Amino acid sequence: MPLISLNMDGNTSDVEWNQKALELAGQMYAGQLNEGIYVADSKLMNMNLFRTLVNPNRPIRFISRCPANFGGKLEAKTIAQAYADGEAWVELGAFGNGKKACFYKGKAYTKSVDGHDIHLVAVCSSAGEVRFQAKQEKALQALEQDIHATNKKIFVCEADAQEEWKRFCKSHKKSLYLYDVTLVETIEEKRPRGNPGKNQKPPQVVSQWSLQIKVAGEDREAMATFRHTEECFVLITNVRPEECGMREVLGTYKNQMIIETDFRLLKEPCIASVIYLKTPERIQSLAMLLHVSLLLRALIQYKLRQGIKEYPGDELPRVGRDGRKLQQNITTRFLIEELRHQGFIEAEAGTYKLIFISPFHHLQMTTFLALMGMTVEGLIEP
């Protein structure tokens, strides 16, 4: 649920925003920072913010993704250790119920960063294997295209051919594949046109050079490292393992998508694509109203889901889309779409009456209101 509304420059960096967010969290939850967990992406992990999080006088529990350049290549070292040690990966299961749900497995480690013990979770995902194969194929195609283009080039001397080979090697120095080359010299005699005269000139000897490059196989070490980095990522946290296991750490981190989904509402074209306001104060006021509306949406969604969990009957009425079963993770958007065509009329001064399209829509309305602790009468009463 959105609790703070703050307008900032669109060019504000994630590092600056995280610093401001930590300050606001400290002001709002003074004395309660150990009860929650601050979750953010890898931009949270720079040494200045890290020291703020692990400050012994006011520590803040956090979960983040470990970036590649943090803590002396801590991510790469952890991934290498996870694949090198003989311990089995711990199955963490799937998150989500769809056909495309990703399965995860992990390994946990404790390391010292800047003098503080930090817990790391190396996470290997099934989607990573698919991603690795796609990028592997793309890398091979790019290499073969450059080989084909380079092999077609003709050079007037060996030195130029050697320079082109150096260029090719520099362009593909991080290639996942090995390649070799053969320098080919082609010698051709060119005679002048027409019939030879009495003083016939000797034929001109023309030498041309070309490269014949071919793929020689995979660079096994580079391929293994690339596979591991695509399959695996590392989460970093100061939450003790006995409080939050590997699956809980991963699940908490992945729940960022809930915030992203809600925040996307504020960026829809019908809401804030173009703002026709003249002063910063008016823009701030509009943003405040938008954030309040987002809070109301979150509260409605919370009440609906809580009502479903606490529903006293054995089974909810089938008031889902087109009469299907109602899902547990119902959203405010679904509610708005389903009740879009419901309306009410003023029967007399101050008295209103709801109009339902069909008995099914009446059942929908009364069920949704009941889940939120409301009634039709309570909705329309003055």
Image (cartoon, rainbow, N blue to C red):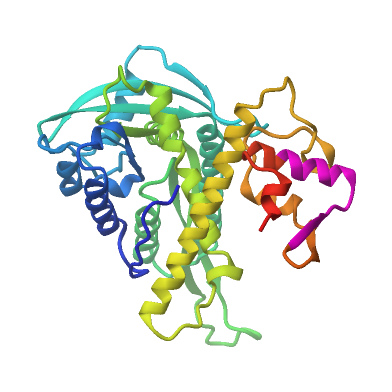
Please say whether residue 182 is visible from this viewpoint.
yes
Observer-nearest of 249 and 337: 337
Q: Is residue 362 magenta?
A: yes
Observer-nearest of 135 and 353: 353
Q: Residue at x 14, y 42 (%)?
A: 51
Side (left or right) of 321 relative to 272: right
**The quadrant where residue 148 appears:** bottom right
Q: Residue at x 38, y 36 (%)?
A: 222
**The quadrant where residue 64 appears:** top left
Side (left or right) of 339 relative to 119: right
Q: Is residue 68 magenta?
A: no
**Residue 257 position in % (x across, y down):** 49, 44
Q: Is residue 281 above or below residue 372?
A: below
**The quadrant where residue 33 appears:** top left
Question: The C terminus appears in which quarter of the rendering?
Answer: bottom right
**Magenta stretch bounds:** 351-367
**Residue 149 position in % (x across, y down):** 54, 61
Please say whether residue 146 is visible from this viewpoint.
no
Observer-nearest of 235 and 354: 354
